[in-house]
Image: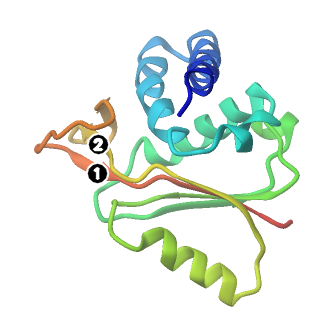
Amino acid sequence: MSVRQEENRKKLFDDIIALAEKKLPKEQAALLEEFTRHYYASVALDDLAFRHISDLFGAIVSHWEIIYQREPGQTHLRIYNPELEKDGWQSTHTIIEIAHDDMPFLVDSIQNELNRRGITTHIIFHAGGVKVKRDAEHKIVQVFPMGSNKKDCLSEAPIFIEIDR
């Protein structure tokens, strides 16, 4: 990645984090900061460039809501058409958000099923391997930095998919 691309990615993350600090309770904003770095890390900047920062923020907050409290082994799924007035962000596509334990072939399996059903996929963000620590109520209390080799944590696989409406 070029220095310019790295600077643009850092600015994007900084803008999303600034919105989180402005709109969310302090503890949630702190957790969302590290989650943001994982969430958009593998997404090409070209795929994010045409999106409004408030929509990127809204998408990550929405996904955070379904991953934040989840028992290991449980799958959380949300399929919806985000509307600015109702959801705080918008998209011209239907959104599929998945919160699942990280495992091999998860994205491939989902993509194969969407293809089998003839559903056009526009983009997939997959932040597999997000390492988190959960409390007794299964709420995330810590998101570990990327590349962490922490052993006493859970590995999550948030998946964001845009499909035709």
Marks 1 and 2 close (CB-CB < 8 Å): yes
Task: Report which residue position mark 2 lands on.
Answer: 131
Q: Nearer the viewer, residue 138 or 42?
A: 42
Query: Residue at left 83%, top 67%?
Result: 164
User: Residue 82's spot in the image, x, y percent?
Assistant: 79, 47
- What residue do we see at 47% from left, 23% from top? 33
Q: Does residue 19 lie above or below 44 as drawn?
A: above
- Residue at 62 percent across and 10 percent down: it is 22
Residue 21 position within the rendered picture, expressed as x and y whole percent measured from the top left: 56, 12
- Image position of 24 with respect to 149: above or below: above
Amino acid type shown at disc 2: Lys
* Secondary element at image label 2: strand
Above or below, comparing residue 46 to residue 161 in the picture: above
**Drawn side of residue 72 relative to residue 25, left or right:** left
Q: Amino acid at mark 1?
A: Ser
- Which residue is pictured at 28% across the width and 58% down the height? 72
Residue 18 at x, y = what percent? Answer: 60, 12
User: Which residue has dot 1 on it?
Assistant: 155
Image location (x, y in percent) of residue 154? 24, 49
Sequence-wise first label, 1 or 2: 2
User: In which quadrant of the rendered image does the C terminus lie?
Assistant: bottom right
